[in-house]
Amino acid sequence: MEVPTAPHSALSSLFASIHDESSIEARMDASLTDVVDAVMGSMHAASQRNKPSMQGLLHGFPQADRRESVAWIVQAFDVMGFTDSAIFQATLLLDRYYARRTPGPISAADAQQKLLAVVCLALKVGSRDEAQVPLQQLVGHLGRGKVRYSAVVGAEVEMLGKLKFSIGTPTAHDFLETLSTRLMHHDQLCASLAEYLLQLTLIDPVLHYGYPHAVLAAAALALALTTLKAPAAAFTP
């Protein structure tokens, strides 16, 4: 008797449908047909496993300080031309660290070193094209020459230990990028709006971590499609 198999997802079906496209990029995407569902499942499991504890985050990271830190990350990364993916990775690393840190006072200097440390860590696990300048020079620029690079490296080591060297875990943005692949034949304004909506959730940890990141990304995408009155074909390939 044959063992029943789960039906392919809409994303897998989309990749299968472009198997005979003329462009090399499309054929490369089509090669993911048989693995994309397993990869998405693994991403979801890793994301759930590494999400920060809500209680730990709310107790370990004063929310006013967190809002200021997230706003700084978004603004600094925009000025430096870093991707949204790096913004989400830096925020996740910062939240995971503070959720595991023993609650207590933290000096302004220590907080600044930790903030610059997550910038470095996020860039190290991201694309090599992200950092166009050496990290030491970047730290000097973002820290306005007031933070020693050696102190930031020390903060990195401390954070890595607290996170048990588990970094580069999937973010909500990673799921959005994957789900947005379905919009390759549609107006990219929907994908841009979905990215903006998802970025807004960063400021509210209860919302951002209150749902699986795959669900959060899908909700942002569905809201963008609905808001822009996208055709039915945009919802299902």
Image: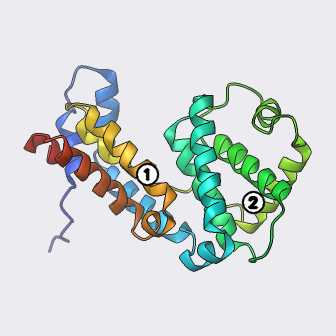
Scheme of image coloration: rainbow
Position of 154 with respect to 201 (left or right) is right
Query: What is the quadrant of residue 33 in the picture?
Result: top left
Per the rendering, the mark at residue 160 is 2
Per the rendering, the mark at residue 120 is none
Residue 205 % position (x, y): 51, 65
As displayed, is residue 66 above or below residue 178?
Answer: below
In depth, the one of 117 and 203 nearer the eye is 203
Asked if disc 1 and disc 2 are in contact, CB closer than 8 Å, the reply is no
Tell me the quarter of the image containing the N terminus. bottom left
Residue at point 32% right, 35% down? 29
Callout 2: SS: helix
Tell me the quarter of the image containing the C terminus. top left
Residue 53 % position (x, y): 57, 75
Query: What is the quadrant of residue 54 in the picture?
Result: bottom right
Q: Residues within 10 Å of mark 2 (few under 14, many from 20)?
A: some
**Residue type of the residue flagged with mark 2:** Leu
In depth, the one of 49 and 82 nearer the eye is 82
Sequence-wise, the earlier of marks 1 and 2 is 2
As displayed, is residue 161 above or below residue 225?
Answer: below
Q: CA distance from mark 1 to mark 2?
A: 27 Å
**Residue type of the residue flagged with mark 1:** Leu
Q: Residues within 10 Å of mark 1 (few under 14, many from 20)?
A: few
Per the rendering, the mark at residue 200 is 1
Residue at point 35% right, 31% down? 28
Position of 214 with respect to 56 (left or right) is left
> Looking at this rendering, what residue extends furthest in the left direction?
232
Residue 22 % position (x, y): 23, 20
In depth, the one of 195 and 175 nearer the eye is 195
Residue 41 % position (x, y): 38, 62
> Looking at this rendering, what residue extends furthest in the top direction?
22
Callout 1: SS: helix
